[in-house]
Image (spheres, grey):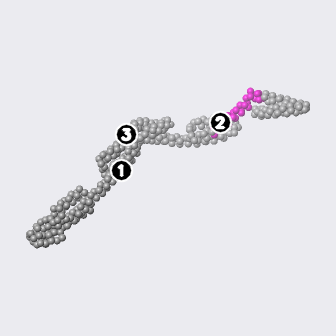
Amino acid sequence: MSSDPWGRVDETGTVYVRTAEGEKEVGSWQAGSPQEALAYFERKYEGLVVEIGLLERRVRTTDLAPKEALAAIEHLRASVTEAHAVGDLAALGERLDALVALVDSRREERKAAKAKQTEEAKSAKEILVAEAEQLAESEQWRTAGERLRALVDTWKGLPRLDRKADDELWHRFSHARSVFSKRRKAHFASLDAQREEARRTKEKLVTEALSLSDSTDWGPTAARYRELMAEWKAAGRAQREAEDDLWNRFRGAQDVFFAARSEVFAERDSSERDNLALKEELVTEAEKLLPVTDLRSARAAFRTLNERWEAIGHVPRDARPRIEARMHTVERALAESEEAEWRRTNPEVRARAAGLTGQLQAAVEKLHQQIETARTAGNNAKADKLQAELDGRQALLDSALKGMQEFGG
């Protein structure tokens, strides 16, 4: 008979393993020595040790699912329990029990990690929902639309929650996107309607602008083009492709008109500058008539100059006041000379002036006598009052005498 600490072989070749419950028959050996029998069954034990070691390493170093790990442990436990092997089978059971504890611990850790991940995902989705609901009322259509699309991508990257919680949050999130989408669609539908109305309005403006492009009624037509431009700006923008075409046609019509007007005005400005030179020559010649020495010849000469003046035509607007003022100065001087001549030669005016002068002379002489009488009588107050009246009459007399001189004495 042969034995070791964990098993023995009796004289009949039966092999036993020692356990806490006592010996257990694991097989028989008839082909060799008892030592060879024990070695054979000890190798079977070592095979179990290797399998358990491999499972331990797999559990510790991989993400083996707890259910799969427990199934593997129970399979090995059955192998140990039913093993035809010699060795410390209890130690193998203890190692399997330790593996069960490790798997349970890992399962709790994973459960806690999953719960934490779920809570974080729920919080993240609630934040996404809150932002989406805020964006639903935005009118920053492009920015808000791009942000909502980014939120969808972020949502897809988050773990799912339990069905009820996930569905509730997704419903709010989807509703916010739907609200924004409907508002944006309504906005652009309204904008399209406005642009279509603007297009129709601008078509009419283009038609009128084209009809005016060959007008030569420069002032009113230019004013109407300014009004058309104001109406164009007030109409708003049409669709982009229509807007560009309409503007090119509208602007082209204006360009035709204003180019023609500019050409005409350029010719007119040149003509008016020539007219100004001619009128400057005439007014210089007219100014040589002053001072008037021979009224008749001066009047005849001015009449001829004025006829030539009127025949010349317009001068530049900015020069008109200056050149006309010079001519009017000469004209007024001639008129004043004519007025003076009329007064000097008019018999009625001359007679009235002579009568007035005689009356004033008689009044002055009478006042001199009254003043002398008053002073002789010692009545100085009356004399002073009469002197003041005399001074006034004397001034009138001097003026009348001067006028008489203008009549030739």
Whole-angstrom CA distance, mark 2 to mark 1, is 98 Å
Left or right position of 269 against 13: right
- Residue at 61% in and 36% down: 306
Q: Is residue 45 visible?
A: no
In the picture, the quarter occupied by the C terminus is top right
The residue that label 2 is drawn on is 331
Disc 1, SS: helix
Q: Earlier in the sequence, mark 2 or mark 1?
A: 1
Chain-order first, disc 1 or disc 3: 1
Residue 142 against residue 389 in the figure, above or below: below
Residue neighbourhood size for the residue with mark 1, other residues' Cα within 10 Å, grouped as few (<14), some (14–19), many (≥20): few
Q: Are circles 2 and 1 on residues that touch, CB within 8 Å?
A: no
Which x, y percent locates residue 24? 15, 65
The one of 104 and 356 positioned closer to us in this rendering? 104
- Between disc 2 and disc 3, whose residue precedes? 3
Please give the range of residues in magenta: 326-354
